[in-house]
Each structure stands twice: as structure tokens, then as C-alpha cells.
Image (cartoon, grey):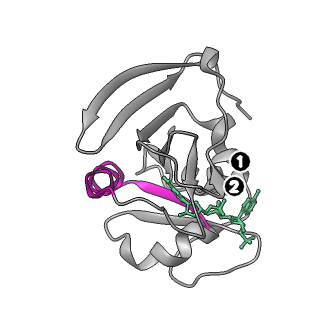
Amino acid sequence: MEITMIAALDEVGGLGKAGRMPWHCPADLRQFQAYTMEKLLLMGRKTAEPLRRRLSGRQLIIQSRTVKDPDFPVVRTVNEALAWMVEHPEYDELVIGGGGEIYALWLPYAAHLRISRIAGRFDCDTFFPKWDPQEWICRKQSEEDGFLLEEWDRTKRIITR
Ligand SMILES: NC(=O)c1ccc[n+]([C@@H]2O[C@H](COP(=O)([O-])OP(=O)(O)OC[C@H]3O[C@@H](n4cnc5c(N)ncnc54)[C@H](OP(=O)(O)O)[C@@H]3O)[C@@H](O)[C@H]2O)c1
């Protein structure tokens, strides 16, 4: 089971402001759609709430300590999410779709980062966690329509249970 984190970052690692992404980059939303389709997508409660009805074609898992959702599995901990995955071997990749708290929680477990670099600074209030460039290698970089797409792989062994 591979764990990939997918995120769009401004020039200073900003992810969002006042609960939303403060830029308009349709090509990035399209690549997010395409990459996550048919996959297992885990999001924090704050990111999932406004999007949960618009993520058809993916299996959404919500991470929360407080809510129950009749329509989607809710996990409280990383271990609960990993246990859910073991029970659903039809999925071979878990995609972490944010936001800031959830990226920080899952970074030690991720083997891949799929990062969209958005030009500019957007006065964000939520940031992607810092990652150690010595532990990661940028395998691919491509200029897309309005953003730069980077694909990073972890070079060191990740935390295992
Ligand atoms: N640029 C991007 O690619 C991107 C992607 C996603 C989101 N975003 C942005 O990120 C912002 C939202 O991020 P955020 O950090 O505020 O919230 P978040 O990570 O989406 O969700 C936070 C919630 O997740 C749950 N949670 C966090 N840590 C947990 C843990 N250790 N165990 C169990 N549950 C845990 C808690 O839910 P409960 O309070 O219910 O317990 C917490 O309130 C928005 O601005 C959004 O637009 C940007």
C-alpha cells in the first residue's frame, strides 16, 4: 500500500486561507480530479466538509475526532485508517488530500508527494509541513497550465508499525 500526499502550494508553502484555496487554477483542479479518481482519498474534517458531495468516483475517508458521517467512513487515528485499508485490499494507494493538520499528521507515513507549485503569495493561514529535502528526491517536474507539477519520492525507509 503506497501513501501519496497531493497538495497545491504557493511560493511560501501556503495551502489555504479562511477555509478555502485562495487562487484559481482550473488545470490544477483537473489534475487533482484525474489523479484521485477511483482511489482512496483521506481528508481532514475541515477540508472534507465543503467537498464531500463533490468527490464522486473516489472513496472518501474523513479524519475527525468529533464527527460521525452516515455517508462516509470516519477514522480517528492513523491506525484506524490503516486498519480500514487492510480490510479493503481492492485499494492499493491511499491519497492524502489535506488540509494542513492532516498533511502534518501523515507526512511521516507518505512515500510520495505530488506538489503543484502556484506562483505568488496568497497570505495563507494554513501551510504544508516542511519536508527534509535530504529524505526526498524530486523524480519529475513538469510545467503545466498555470502551475509547476513536482513528483517527489521518499529516499529513506518510512515509519512502519
Ligand atoms: N492547497 C491544497 O492543496 C489544499 C488541500 C486541502 C485543504 N486545503 C486548505 O487547508 C485548509 C484546511 O486545513 P486545516 O488544517 O484547517 O484542516 P484539516 O486538516 O482539513 O482538518 C482538520 C480537522 O481534521 C481532524 N484532525 C486533525 N488532526 C487529527 C488527528 N490527529 N486525529 C484525528 N482527527 C484529526 C480534526 O477534525 P475534528 O475537529 O472534527 O476532530 C481537525 O479539526 C483550508 O483552507 C483548505 O482550503 C488546501
- The disc labelled 1 sits on which kind of residue? Leu
User: Which residue does the image show at 62% across and 18% down from the upper left?
Assistant: 135
Instruction: Please name the residue shown 45% across and 73% down the image.
Output: 51
Viewer-proximal residue, 68 or 140? 140
Answer above or below: position of 129 versus 70.
above
Is the CB atom of the residue marked by disc 1 within 8 angstroms of ligand 1's nearest atom? yes
Instruction: Left or right? Give the position of 133 relative to 95.
Output: right
In the rendered structure, which amino acid carries the disc numbered 2? Glu
Secondary structure under the numbered disc 1 in the rendered image = helix
Of the four image quadrants, the one with ligand 1 is bottom right
Residue 56 rendering spot, x and y as whole percentages = 33, 71
Residue mark closest to the camera, 1 vs 2: 2
Q: Quadrant of the C terminus?
A: top right
Magenta-tinted stretch: 25-44
Residue picked out by circle 1: 105
On residue 140, the disc is none
Furthest residue in direction left, as rendered: 145
Mark 2 lies on a secondary structure that is helix
Nearer-the-camera pick, 13 or 32:
13
Numbered badge on residue 101: 2
**Label 2 Cα crowd, 10 Å radius (few <14 / some 14-19 / many 20+):** some
Assess mark 2: CB under 8 A from ligand 1?
Answer: yes
Front in this rendered view, residue 113 or 24: 24
Question: Which quarter of the figure has residue 40?
Answer: bottom left
- Determine contact: label 1, label 2, CB under 8 Å: yes
- Image coordinates of residue 84 in percent, x first then y, are 59, 57
Q: Residue drawn 70% across and 69% down?
A: 64
- Is residue 38 inside the magenta stretch? yes
Coordinates of residue 36 in the picture (x, y in percent): 36, 53
Q: How many marks?
A: 2
